[in-house]
Image (tube, rainbow, N blue to C red):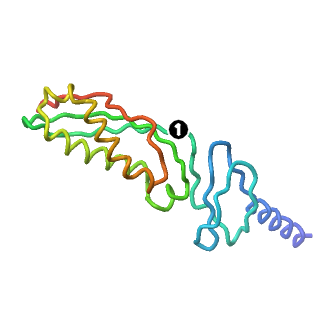
């Protein structure tokens, strides 16, 4: 009797592990023995429990990230903090999973380095006038990574520029 109960529990566990339910607006990247196998879309997906593994669950919804870039030095040697916001959508989940460790960290790096480079050529008083030029350079830098990382940029905005007083 105990062996039968143990067997039923094992069968139930294997059955439960062989079914993956993917929610609406998400996809799962599945690997078999460490290699990409398929992208599971919303609904029910059957897998082999020991061989298949979910590498990542990726949201296909529009995603917004806020970044605060601190201690950016202007041409007239004033320190400013710049708050930016970016909205993206993952278009190719396989690239977003395998081409970069973290899309969010990659975006933060691109925005930070672009702002440091562009703001250092402007005077503090010109920052507010050149806001659109700053956004254009951020978008230009993001366009380089969009195809490689599998996302599209929907919106980029500079929310706030604050003078840092020491």
How many numbered tags mark residues here? 1
Q: Position of residue 37 (x, y in %)?
A: 64, 67
Q: Is residue 23 above or below residue 100?
A: above
Label 1, secondary structure: give it. loop
Query: Considering the image in quadrants, where does the N terminus appear?
Result: bottom right
Q: Quadrant of residue 124?
A: top left
- Rendering coords of residue 52 (x, y %): 67, 68
Q: Quadrant of residue 102?
A: bottom left
Q: Nearer the viewer, residue 90 or 1?
A: 90
- Residue with the mark numbered 1: 62
x and y percent of residue 35 in the render?
58, 71
Query: Does residue 133 lie above or below 103 as drawn?
Result: above
Percent x, y for residue 164? 16, 31
* Residue at 49% from the left image edge and 62% from the top image edge: 98
Check disc 1: other Cα within 10 Å, few if <14, some if 14-19, many if 20+.
few
Q: Residue 154 vs residue 127: left or right?
A: right
- What residue lies at 60% left-to-right and 59% top-to-bottom? 29
Q: Which of 144/99 is in front?
A: 144
Quadrant position of the C terminus in the picture: top left
The residue under the point 35% across, 32% down is: 157
Left or right: where 40 falls relative to 91:
right
Q: Nearer the viewer, residue 128 or 34?
A: 128
Rendering quarter of residue 73 = top left
Q: Is residue 25 above or below residue 34?
A: above
131 vs 37: above or below: above
Q: Is residue 141 left or right of residue 64?
A: left
């Amino acid at each position: 009797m105990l062996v039968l109960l143990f067997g039923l529990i094992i069968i139930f566990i294997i059955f439960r592990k062989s079914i993956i339910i993917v929610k609406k607006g998400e996809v799962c990247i599945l690997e078999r023995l460490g290699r990409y196998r398929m992208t599971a879309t919303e609904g029910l997906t059957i897998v082999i429990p020991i061989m298949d593994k979910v590498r990542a669950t990726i949201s296909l919804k529009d995603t917004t990230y806020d970044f605060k870039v601190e201690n950016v030095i202007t041409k007239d040697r004033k320190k400013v903090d710049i708050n930016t916001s970016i909205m993206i959508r993952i278009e190719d989940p396989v690239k977003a999973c395998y081409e970069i460790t973290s899309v969010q960290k990659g975006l933060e790096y691109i925005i930070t380095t672009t702002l440091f480079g562009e703001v250092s050529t402007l005077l503090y008083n010109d920052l507010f006038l050149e806001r659109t030029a700053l956004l254009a350079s951020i978008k230009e830098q993001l366009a380089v990574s969009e195809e490689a990382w599998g996302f599209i940029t929907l919106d980029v905005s500079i929310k706030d520029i604050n003078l840092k007083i020491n």
